[in-house]
Amino acid sequence: MKKFANIALTMVLVLAACSKLETSPVETTTSRISFEVGCYAPQTKAGGVSFLDNYAGSFRSKAWMRASGIAPRAYFGENGETITWDGASKNWVPGHDYYWPKSSSSYIDFFSWYDSFSYDPSIVYDNAASPTTATMTWTRTVEASDVILVADAAWRQSTNTNTYSVDDPSVAGVPTLFRNYLSRVEMKMRSLHDTDPDNSTVTYEVALQSAKISGLYHTGTLTLTNADPGAKGSQAWTAASGTDYAWVADTGSAADVDIAGVSPISETAVSILAQRSFLPQQLTNAKLDLLLTITTKSNGIVTASESDIAVSLNLNTIKNASNVAITTWVPNKTYTYTLIINPINQEILLEPTLKDWSSDVEFISVVVE
């Protein structure tokens, strides 16, 4: 074991002795702390778990050693630990070796997360001596590439366990099931007709000059709470806001999202806004404004061309496959808007469909077409 790890472990033992909290570890292979990461699907990807392989291949965790009536002690230190995949042991492991306490009266709470911007969320207990609830707080101005994953809180853990469906039964550890706390949005566009359905000599060319989304907030605070279940287990966090979109938006953070022009727009859908992250929020004032050019040709000769055709859509009026308006963007969902322009009457069509959860992606998908 590395000298640093020995020093860290010794410090933990000294602190524990002072508080009469039993933390003496049994340093065997089976008692070393590891993590088992769930991703709503079997962990089958070689070299690790596919859920995190698409990101940095690591996550962060903080842990507190506890016993009845004794104030918690930070077991991974105040700054927590980085957890990475160890191909040799087929487990997710901390950067230093840590071991489970041998006393049956001692246990550890784990709070884990991943973010793409090296954030350190506030994690506190409600009661220093005898905690009943943990609170995690994030404040962020969300950027297009942001990712925030928060794992279900793992309470009162005392040994590595096999919790999720995996391809190797030897994989065990602290149960760590991640949920995404941002929304993902993408927009596509296509033309309903390249050729007039009643006259094959007449063709249409559509171009998106520019577009913008307005009325969205980009900064907010996410406060999550998790109550100690009183027994070993893991459970999802609850948003303190009490809303399905979880975050409390800073209403002074509204800013337009500009979309560059795309040409040509044909019957095959093309991307006008690549999939990106947004702050989950109500879409009360959210609008999509487009400027279009439509050119009509007869036998290849231009017969009409009109530019600066303005189209405006209120995002909260667009409905899903169940004919229910999507009035909020909520965490852990991807929204795909496919806009269909009819070049004959210049109308925008929206044909909604709903795509269920897929184990191939990190988000539940709601598709509006």
Image (spheres, rainbow, N blue to C red):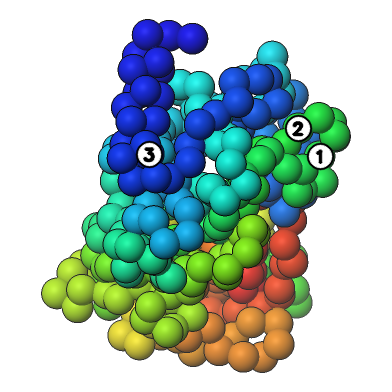
Q: Is residue 299 left or right of residue 227?
A: right
User: Circles 1 and 2: CB distance less than 8 Å?
Assistant: yes
- Name the amino acid, label 2: Val
Nearer the camera: disc 3 or disc 2: 3
Q: Position of residue 146 (x, y in %)?
A: 38, 48
**Element class at badge 1:** loop
142 relative to 351, above or below:
above
Looking at the image, tell me whether mark 1 or mark 2 is earlier in sequence order: 1
User: What residue is shown with label 2?
Assistant: 171
Quarter residue 47 falls in: top right
Gap between marks 1 and 2, in whole Å?
Answer: 7 Å
Instruction: Tell which of 356 and 189 is nearer to you.
Output: 356
Q: Report the label total.
A: 3
- Residue 303, compared with residue 8, is above or below; it is below
Give the mark nearest the N terminus, 3 or 2: 3
Numbered disc in front, either 1 or 2: 2
- What is the C-alpha distance between the residues marked 3 and 2? 30 Å
Q: Residues within 10 Å of mark 1 (few under 14, many from 20)?
A: some
From mark 3 to mark 1, how far is it between C-alphas? 35 Å
The answer to whether residue 72 is left or right of residue 151 is left
Type of amino acid at the residue the image marks with label 3:
Ala
Q: Earlier in the sequence, mark 3 or mark 1?
A: 3
Task: Give the residue at mark 3.
Answer: 16
Q: Position of residue 188 (x, y in %)?
A: 54, 60
Residue to which mark 1 is pinned: 166
Q: Position of residue 240 (x, y in %)?
A: 38, 78
Tell whether 45 sits left or right of 262: right
